[in-house]
């Protein structure tokens, strides 16, 4: 049983055969690549700029075994100044992490100014919706409009997370009154979805929204894989929120997104019609690497 979230452990085969084999594979093949892509410390930020990852999962999520303490430590190692814990339909990790943070700061594993943004990723009936700066539990399964309304009533910001991808709102993102949109989400690995996301963010309904970059990390290694540079006037949760609402955000991505977009461009000519039905947001010009200058 997980000590943090009380999630039951898996069976004998999984524990002694499947997981050790997976770990060996990761150590030999995946870890060096992940380290090369995401392991580097971010460049030193200019004064008044904070680096934040607004979409991180911990073991309190049904689909993650990420150790909450290690997520925080890795965020600081990566050079992030704040993360938002946004577990699926779950907010227990926020209070758990809040208990850890004073000790981690005392041990100098986190910088003194490090901030934790309370959040949740709500599975609405229409797709996933991010709730940032939200202290209250927002129940899953409600229509997207109602979910956004509840997030606002609870004092949170509603984010259109991964507009395309698994359990995404897709074109419906354009209909609802979001407070921000995720331009980069590092858990989206389908080249077409990356390109469609860039394209829908250029549509008039979403182009006016503050843009975020986030890892959507489900394990300790991924935190900060994509992130957002935020120009704050005050290093506090209130200052962060004000800066995001004012749109002083620059989403940043890593080499993986560039690679996926390059793949998409290579294949664009052959399957453009099937991937981009005419009239969809994704048929907008610009679903290409030039969006990366954001
Ligand atoms: Zn999601
Ligand atoms: Zn997520």
Image: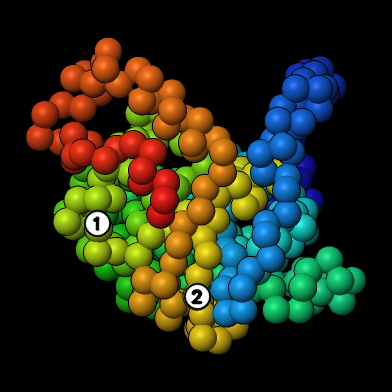
Quarter of image, res 149: bottom left
Seen from the viewer's position, the closer of residues 171 and 67 is 171
Q: In the image, is 48 to the left or to the right of 175?
A: right
- N-term-proximal mark, 1 vs 2: 1
Residue 138: x and y, percent?
Answer: 41, 62
Residue 92: x and y, percent?
Answer: 61, 62
Within 8 Å of ligand 1, the CB of disc 1?
Answer: no
202 vs 186: above or below: below
Residue drawn 50% across the image and 75% down it: 231
Q: In the image, is 32 to the left or to the right of 239?
A: right
Q: Residues within 10 Å of mark 2 (few under 14, many from 20)?
A: many
Q: Is residue 18 visible?
A: yes
168 vs 107: above or below: above
Q: In the image, is 147 to the left or to the right of 113?
A: left
Seen from the viewer's position, the closer of residues 223 and 194 is 194
Q: CA distance from mark 1 to mark 2?
A: 21 Å
Quarter of image, res 27: top right
Q: Is residue 164 visible?
A: no
Residue 263: x and y, percent?
Answer: 43, 23
Q: Secondary structure at mark 1?
A: helix
Seen from the viewer's position, the closer of residues 153 and 76 is 76
Q: Circle 1 is placed at which residue position?
A: 206
155 vs 187: above or below: below
Residue drawn 81% across the image and 22% down it: 28
Residue drawn 51% across the image and 53% down it: 252
Rendered image: mark on residue 231: 2
- The quadrant of the picture occupied by the C terminus is bottom left
């Amino acid at each position: 049983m997980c000590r943090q979230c009380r999630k039951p452990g898996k069976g004998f085969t999984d524990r002694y055969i499947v997981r050790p084999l997976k770990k060996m594979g990761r150590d030999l093949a995946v870890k060096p690549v992940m380290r090369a892509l995401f392991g580097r410390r971010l460049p030193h930020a200019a004064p008044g700029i904070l680096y934040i990852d607004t979409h991180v999962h911990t073991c309190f999520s049904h689909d993650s075994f990420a150790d909450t303490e290690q997520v925080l430590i890795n965020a600081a190692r990566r050079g992030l100044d704040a993360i938002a814990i946004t577990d699926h339909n779950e907010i227990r990790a926020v209070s758990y992490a809040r208990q850890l943070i004073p000790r981690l700061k005392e041990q100098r594993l986190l910088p003194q100014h490090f901030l934790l943004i309370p959040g949740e990723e709500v599975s609405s009936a229409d797709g996933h919706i991010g709730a940032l700066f939200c202290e209250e539990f927002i129940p899953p399964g409600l229509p997207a409009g109602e979910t956004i309304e509840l997030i606002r009533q609870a004092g949170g910001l509603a984010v259109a997370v991964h507009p395309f991808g698994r359990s995404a709102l897709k074109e419906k993102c354009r209909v609802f009154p979001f407070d921000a949109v995720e331009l980069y989400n590092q858990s989206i690995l389908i080249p077409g979805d990356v390109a469609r996301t860039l394209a829908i963010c250029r549509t008039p309904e979403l182009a006016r929204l503050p843009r975020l970059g986030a890892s959507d990390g489900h394990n300790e290694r991924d935190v900060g894989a994509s992130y957002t540079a935020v120009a704050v006037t005050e290093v506090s949760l209130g200052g962060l929120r004000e800066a995001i609402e004012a749109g002083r955000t620059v989403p940043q991505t890593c080499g993986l997104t560039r690679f996926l977009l390059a793949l998409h461009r290579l294949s664009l000519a052959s399957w453009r019609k099937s991937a981009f039905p005419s009239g969809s947001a994704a048929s907008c010009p610009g679903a290409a690497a030039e969006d990366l200058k954001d």
